[in-house]
């Protein structure tokens, strides 16, 4: 008898809970700024909310879950995958540390957008922080959401000083937390080997860890996107209503917090909501929306009362938009550059997208896959999001080639973990041994079945 499934389930709940708690703390900080209630209230909230959320999700997962032990050869494969994952993570940690030392302030977006805004929040008393949201510094995108700036400023508030370690620590949490989330979620849904294989696929993508060290919002976007997919997959598996609603609420919160990380996250939320409405059970829609509403309210407040007009749909962005939409050369350039960046993504000798496609072809898709509605919803949401990216490139009033060169890889970073999750959820295991897993009564309302 092995307790690893129970451990994976605990890890899954803790990492989703900490991610959601961190996002809600960020929104609480913003609410304190707007209301003028005093930033000292934020300090205990930043600590307590994440801890309490993690404890709440962890409850009832301590008992061992009945499961068949794998055959000896499969155990050997599991050990090899685990060893490979540890080795890759050590390399990734080295890359992350090296990039953080080399560029302690992050890249352009980090210090010109996210950390710049954090300085306004931390240094300016009263309502002077609003000076960071004017057209005078439109180059800093004052319409971008505030997940990272508020978390960085809140961390500085806790320390009592500005420190470069805070944005680095946040980048580390979201980057390596995404790997843990990938491992734990697929280990619970598909078994340890598939979870390890998915984590290896993510850990073997150097650009993901470089972007995490750059202190930008693209990795947090990928984290919340993956969290929403994993939580919805769990909601579809849980048989009792209490556990099902809990995971669906978490999926809604994570999808909405994706929109608090970056504007692209709002596109994901809309695409995911449309997709699950069309492809999944209606009983999951209401708790999903209920979970999303508390996180959407601060976004609506920010967009209505604080943010400047969008550089895409503002007056300057709308000028010449129809001409750009009818320019055939823009379509060709976007398609050509998209193929190039997908092929060079990694960077590896062969595109990881191609490797993942080959794996799915060789392994084959599962028959009688009860996760099919989630897979369809996730794939449709990713496709709709990619189409949205295409439209933004098409319509945006900037040099298109420069825009593609500077942003395409970061958009792929946002999509990549979700693609890995869905492929590994859909594919058969390398071996054909059959097993089932169900969470015992120790997990309230969470009877989960696992078929390969």
Image: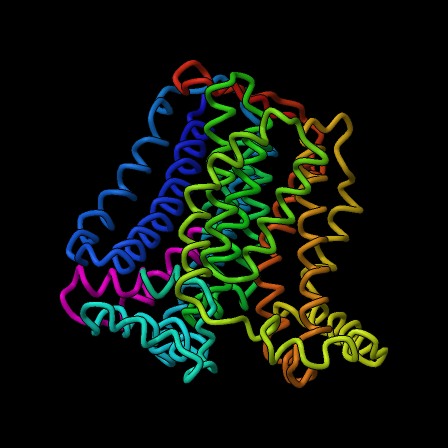
Q: On the image, which quarter does residue 90 sit in?
A: bottom left
Magenta-drawn stretch, dominant element (helix, strand or loop): helix
Identify which residue is drawn at 49% across, 26% down: 245
Q: Compared to 255, does 187 lie above or below?
A: above
Q: Compared to 130, does 419 lie above or below?
A: above
Queried whether the magenta region covers residue 434, the answer comes back as: no
Q: As drawn, is 40 to the left or to the right of 112?
A: left
**Residue 153 position within the rendered picture, expressed as x and y whole percent measured from the top left:** 26, 65
**Residue 104 position within the rendered picture, expressed as x and y whole percent measured from the top left:** 33, 77
**Residue 30 position within the rendered picture, expressed as x and y whole percent measured from the top left:** 31, 57
Q: Compared to 165, does 320 lie above or below?
A: below
- Number of numbered markers: 0
Identify which residue is drawn at 35% across, 60% down: 170
Queried whether the magenta region covers residue 152, the answer comes back as: yes
Q: Quadrant of the N terminus?
A: top left
Q: As drawn, is 142 to the left or to the right of 167?
A: right
- Colouring used for the render: rainbow
Q: Is residue 71 visible?
A: no
The magenta stretch spans which residues? 151-177
**Residue 389 position within the rendered picture, expressed as x and y whole percent measured from the top left:** 67, 64
């Amino acid at each position: 008898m092995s307790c690893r499934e129970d451990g994976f389930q605990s890890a899954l709940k803790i990492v989703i809970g900490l991610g959601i708690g961190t996002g809600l703390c960020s929104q609480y900080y913003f609410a304190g700024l707007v209301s003028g209630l005093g930033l000292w209230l934020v300090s205990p909230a930043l600590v307590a909310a994440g801890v309490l959320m993690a404890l709440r999700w962890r409850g009832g997962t301590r008992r061992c879950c009945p499961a068949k032990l794998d055959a000896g050869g499969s155990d050997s494969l599991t050990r090899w995958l685990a060893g490979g994952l540890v080795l890759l993570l050590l390399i990734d940690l080295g890359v992350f540390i090296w990039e953080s030392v080399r560029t302690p302030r992050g890249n352009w977006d980090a210090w010109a957008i996210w950390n710049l805004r954090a300085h306004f929040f931390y240094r300016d008393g009263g309502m002077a922080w609003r000076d960071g949201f004017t057209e005078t510094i439109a180059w800093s995108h004052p319409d971008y959401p505030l997940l990272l700036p508020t978390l960085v400023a809140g961390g500085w508030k806790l320390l009592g000083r500005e420190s470069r370690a805070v944005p680095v620590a946040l980048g580390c949490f979201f980057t390596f937390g995404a790997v843990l989330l990938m491992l734990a979620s697929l280990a619970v849904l598909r078994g340890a080997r598939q979870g390890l294989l998915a984590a290896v696929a993510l850990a073997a993508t150097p650009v993901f860890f470089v972007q995490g060290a750059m202190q930008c919002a693209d990795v947090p976007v990928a984290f919340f996107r993956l969290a929403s997919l994993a939580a919805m997959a769990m909601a579809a598996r849980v048989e009792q209503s209490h556990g099902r609603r809990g995971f669906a609420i978490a999926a809604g919160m994570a999808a909405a917090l994706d929109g608090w990380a970056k504007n692209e996250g709002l596109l994901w939320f809309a695409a995911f909501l449309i997709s699950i409405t069309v492809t999944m059970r209606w009983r999951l829609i209401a708790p999903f929306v209920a979970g999303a509403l508390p996180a959407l309210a601060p976004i609506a407040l920010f967009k209505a009362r604080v943010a400047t007009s969008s550089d895409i749909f503002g007056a300057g962005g709308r000028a010449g938009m129809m001409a750009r939409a009818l320019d055939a050369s823009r379509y060709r350039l976007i398609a050509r550059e998209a193929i190039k960046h997908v092929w060079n993504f990694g960077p590896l000798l062969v595109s990881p997208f191609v490797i993942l496609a080959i794996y799915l072809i060789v392994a084959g898709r599962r028959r009688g896959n009860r996760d099919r509605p989630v897979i369809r919803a996730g794939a449709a949401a990713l496709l709709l999001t990619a189409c949205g990216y295409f439209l933004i490139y098409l319509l945006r009033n900037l040099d298109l080639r420069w825009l593609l060169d500077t942003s395409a890889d970061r958009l792929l970073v946002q999509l990549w973990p979700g693609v890995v999750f869905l492929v590994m959820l859909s594919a058969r295991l390398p071996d054909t041994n059959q097993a089932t897993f169900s969470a015992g009564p120790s997990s309230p309302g969470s009877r989960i079945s696992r078929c390969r």
